[in-house]
Image (cartoon, grey):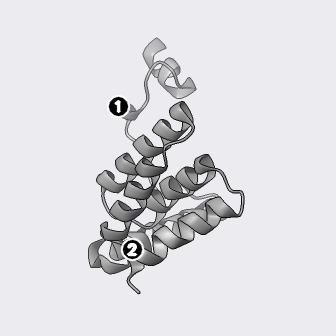
């Protein structure tokens, strides 16, 4: 069988086991954020989720979202996305190490701070 058939079958099994459409739509949004590449899969999944929340029973929209996400480019298939994920993790860990040693890894420029931050308010008063 192909993955679209398996995905629809899994969705039907989840519904048959008592999971709500809301729960499935929420998991599709989570998948779109974590595993799909680009904004379109997230926007599609989020709009499907909003529709389910508002209407409560929209199995066709849910099925279409599952099929769309099957065809969406996956994170694991994108070399650029994989590179940036590794780089993000490397930066996160390096930053943690710097703060353990009480070293700031970078100084933020003043233009980053606005009137809503304590540092921005202090700069404004100067």
Quadrant location of the C terminus in the rendered image: top left
Can residue 90 be seen here? The reply is no
Disc 2 designates what residue? 4
Q: Residue furthest right?
A: 18
Numbered badge on residue 31: none
Within 10 Å of disc 2 (Cα), the crowding (few <14, some 14-19, many 20+) is: some
Q: In this view, does 121 lie to the left or right of 16?
A: left
65 vs 89, nearest the viewer: 65
Q: In this view, does 79 lie to the left or right of 69?
A: left
Indicate the secondary structure of the residue bearing disc 1.
Answer: helix
Within 10 Å of disc 1 (Cα), the crowding (few <14, some 14-19, many 20+) is: few
Numbered badge on residue 111: 1
Q: Which residue lies furthest to the top in this view?
A: 125
The total number of labels drawn is 2
Image coordinates for residue 53, horizontal then vertical, percent = 55, 36
Indicate the secondary structure of the residue bearing disc 2.
Answer: helix
């Amino acid at each position: 069988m192909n993955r679209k058939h398996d995905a629809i079958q899994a969705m039907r099994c989840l519904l048959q086991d008592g999971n709500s459409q809301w729960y499935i739509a929420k998991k599709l949004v989570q998948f779109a954020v974590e595993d799909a590449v680009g904004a379109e899969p997230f926007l599609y999944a989020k709009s499907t989720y909003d529709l389910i929340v508002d209407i409560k029973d929209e199995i066709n929209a849910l099925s279409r979202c599952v099929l769309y996400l099957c065809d969406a480019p996956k994170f694991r298939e994108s070399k650029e996305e994989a590179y940036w994920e590794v780089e993000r993790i490397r930066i996160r860990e390096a930053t943690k190490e710097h703060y353990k040693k009480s070293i700031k890894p970078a100084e933020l420029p003043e233009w980053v701070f606005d009137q809503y931050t304590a540092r921005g308010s202090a700069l404004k008063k100067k």
